[in-house]
Image (cartoon, grey):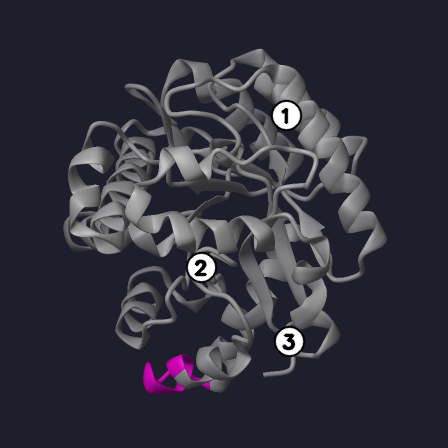
Amino acid sequence: MTDLIDFHCHHVPARYELTTLRNFPASQRARWEHLNRRLADPLALIESIDDGDLSGRVVNVPTALLTDQDEVPPSALFRDINDQLAELVASRPGLYGLASVDAFSGDAGALELTRAVKTLGLRGVFVESSRGDLLLDAAEAKPTLEAAAALGVPVFAHPINPQPLTGRMSQYGHLGTLWARGTVNEATLLALLGSGTLDRLPELQLVVTTLAIGAVMLAGAFGDLAGRQIYIDTMAFNPALIRATVDLLGAERVLAGSDWPILSDGPIADRFAAALAKAEIGEADQALIGGGNARRLLGI
């Protein structure tokens, strides 16, 4: 595959202190010590671009990795993160940035998103799927979603660790934690569908992760996803899940995404191509999923 853009990549500038070692179970400490080093290393982002494995990475900076559970980040943190990210992607060909925005901050979120896109040149927005009992259909999130629709940039709704569910499920290992995180990604997708938000904002382009596959399958089985402005990534590169998402949403709504470096690190092109082949995805659709959809969505 000649064009492969990884839509789901994380980075945390080294100036920030990561809180992962105290927010995740002690059994995962060694894993997160390694991940923290990778997250803070800007050179790690471009390794796969320089060696030809990837054409590009779409990078976000999750404030959930910089705050304690249930802590609301200050607005100044989002501005600083976006300034840092804009500087990074401007200096590294092949990197494209998603602005970090507090979607539940009302007009403040919309203003920061507008600044990040119009002034800083970032190409989309990265938001948490929930805040306490609020999902992205909440009135507090309306200004940010409206701004994204007006600006023509995608909204990447990312999972968080919902409590107390994550604490309860973490005793069952990494899969337990992933399942808990997936529930909130699914919930916000169903909320946006059920509340009519996606109908009221037809220009809004929503991206969810593979962890939201259950909601996509439910909506596909009991509703109508044809033509809906919903995208999903290929996290884990599972052929059965890729086949299902293509069948439910169409190849034009599926994005190559690895959750780098948290779920997937190292070269991915060969694994990705093998997964698409096993899923019996045709050549034209492979080109869309690999890079074409990301280029169209981000305007690159």
Whole-Å distance between the Cαs marked 1 and 3? 31 Å
Q: Which stretch did the figure color magenta?
A: 275-282
The amino acid type, in three-letter code, at marker 1 is Phe
The amino acid type, in three-letter code, at marker 3 is Asp
Whole-Å distance between the Cαs marked 3 and 2? 17 Å
How far across and down, in percent of the image, does residue 180 sit? 23, 42
How far across and down, in percent of the image, does residue 26 sit? 31, 43
Query: CB atoms at circles 3 and 2 under 8 Å apart?
Result: no
Query: CB atoms at circles 1 and 3 under 8 Å apart?
Result: no
How far across and down, in percent of the image, does residue 276 sit? 41, 80
Q: What residue would you read off at disc 3?
A: 3
Q: Is residue 74 above or below residue 15?
A: above
Q: Is residue 118 above or below residue 88?
A: above
SS type, badge 3: loop
Q: Residue at x 54, y 79 (%)?
A: 269
Q: What residue would you read off at disc 2?
A: 253
The amino acid type, in three-letter code, at marker 2 is Arg
